[in-house]
Image: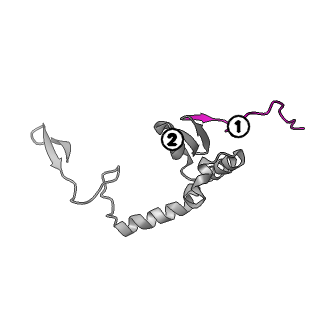
C-alpha cells in the first residue's frame, strides 16, 4: 500500500490518504497499472528474446571453450547482443569463474584481455611480420 499526503485547503492541515493498488496488477514507475500478462504472453516474449540472444541460439559450449579461436568467436557474437552491457555487469557482480560473458573473457572471476590456450607457452613467439 502507498501512503500519500494531501493538503486540506479548508482547514490547512495535512491528511493521510491510503491508496491501494488494484488486485492482481502491477504498476509501472509512473504509477499507472500495467496490463495483465498471461503465461502465454510471457512464453512468447521469452521465445522472441531468445531468438535475439546469440548465447541462446548458438552452441552453449562456445562460451566456455578452451581454444582461443572459439573464445574469440563467442566474444564477437556477444558484441551483437542487445543485452551485452547487462550480461557483463551481472557476470562481474556474480564474479563468474570462467567463460565469455558480455563480450569479455573471465578467468578465475576476473576479466582478462586474452585467454591463453592450455599447455606450456612457446619459448619463441612467432613473428607477426
Front residue of this view, candidates 87 and 63: 63
Which quarter of the figure has residue 16?
top left
In the image, residue 56 above or below residue 129:
below
What's drawn in magenta, residue-wise? Answer: 110-129
Q: Sequence-wise, which precedes: disc 1 or disc 2?
A: 2
Secondary structure, mark 1, is loop
Classify 10 Å Cα crowding around label 1: few (below 14), some (14-19), many (20 and above).
Answer: few
User: Which percent across, then down, holds residue 1?
Assistant: 19, 48
Colouring scheme applied when the structure was drawn? one colour
Q: On the image, numbered disc 1 is attached to which residue?
A: 119
- Front one among 28 and 100: 100
Query: Secondary structure of the magenta portion, mostly?
Result: loop
Quadrant position of the C terminus in the picture:
top right
| Residue depicted at 13% across the width and 41% down the height | 15
**Residue 91 tag number:** 2
Residue found at the very far left of the displayed protein: 11
Q: In which quarter of the image is residue 58?
A: bottom right
Measured as percent of width and height from the top left, residue 23 is found at 21, 59
Specify whether residue 112 is painted magenta: yes
- Extreme residue in the top direction: 123
Give me the residue at 19% from left, 43% from top: 3
Observer-side mark, 1 or 2, equals: 1
Q: Does the magenta run of residues contain 113?
A: yes
Q: Position of residue 39 (x, y in %)?
A: 35, 66
Question: Left or right: where does residue 124 sit relative to residue 82?
Answer: right
Distance from Cα at disc 1 to Cα at disc 2: 26 Å
53 to 93, vertically: above or below: below
Q: Which residue lies furthest to the right in this view?
A: 129
Amino acid at each position: 500500500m502507498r501512503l500519500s499526503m494531501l493538503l486540506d485547503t479548508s482547514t490547512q492541515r495535512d491528511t493521510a490518504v491510503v491508496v491501494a493498488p488494484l488486485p492482481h496488477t502491477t504498476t509501472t514507475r509512473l504509477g499507472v497499472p500495467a496490463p495483465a500478462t498471461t503465461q502465454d504472453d510471457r512464453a512468447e516474449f521469452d521465445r522472441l528474446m531468445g531468438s535475439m540472444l546469440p548465447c541462446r541460439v548458438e552452441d552453449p559450449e562456445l562460451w566456455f571453450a578452451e581454444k582461443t579461436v572459439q573464445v574469440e568467436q563467442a566474444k564477437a557474437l556477444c558484441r551483437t547482443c542487445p543485452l551485452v552491457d547487462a550480461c557483463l555487469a551481472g557476470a562481474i557482480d556474480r564474479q563468474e569463474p570462467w567463460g565469455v560473458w558480455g563480450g569479455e573473457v573471465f578467468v578465475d572471476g576476473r576479466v582478462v584481455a586474452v585467454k591463453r590456450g592450455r599447455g606450456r607457452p612457446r619459448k619463441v613467439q612467432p613473428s607477426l611480420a
